[in-house]
Amino acid sequence: MLVIVAFMVTATSGLADHEQALATGLATMTQQIGITMGTPIMSAIATAVLGGLRVAIAVNAALVLLGVLTSTVFLRGADRPRAS
């Protein structure tokens, strides 16, 4: 639960009030797409072969690492103007 709250705070911090709803909607949509696509893909990989569970975990870990790296790049380079 703390991760979801921190994710939303990060996604909406520094935005003007009239942009908050759009940012929240886009962040929520991104979460839902990840859940919707991630669960069946990981399940398919896990059941495809006997050793599929290890592959599924490795793919999942790689995707998480990619997400962390992408977030780091975008958050580091984001000099968004603060709402007044």
Image (spheres, rainbow, N blue to C red):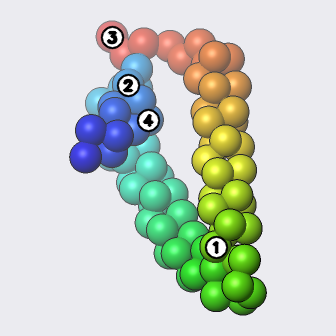
Query: Callout 1 environment at 10 Å: few (<14), some (14 to 19), or many (20+)?
Result: some
3 to the left or right of 53: left
20 to the left or right of 30: left
Find disc 4 in the rendering and name its residue: 11
Question: Which picture quadrant has residue 68?
Answer: top right
For the point 54% across and 64% down, which residue is it?
A: 34
Q: Earlier in the sequence, mark 3 or mark 2?
A: 2
Q: Earlier in the sequence, mark 2 or mark 1?
A: 2
Find disc 3 in the rendering and name its residue: 84
Find disc 1 in the rendering and name its residue: 53
- Residue type, mark 1 in image: Leu
Find disc 2 in the rendering and name its residue: 13
- Distance from disc 2 to disc 4, alpha carbons, whole Å, reads 6 Å
8 to the left or right of 65: left
- Distance from disc 3 to disc 2, alpha carbons, whole Å, reads 12 Å
Question: Which picture quadrant has residue 49?
Answer: bottom right
Q: Earlier in the sequence, mark 1 or mark 3?
A: 1
Q: Percent x, y for residue 18?
A: 33, 36
Q: Nearer the viewer, residue 63 or 84?
A: 63
- Distance from disc 4 to disc 1, alpha carbons, whole Å, reads 32 Å
Task: Look at the numbered discs 3 and 4 and tell me whether their residues touch, using CB distance below 8 Å.
Answer: no
Q: Earlier in the sequence, mark 3 or mark 4?
A: 4
Task: Look at the numbered discs 2 and 4 and tell me whether their residues touch, using CB distance below 8 Å.
Answer: yes
- Residue type, mark 3 in image: Ser
- Residue type, mark 4 in image: Ala
Q: Mark 4, mark 1: which one is toward the viewer? A: 1
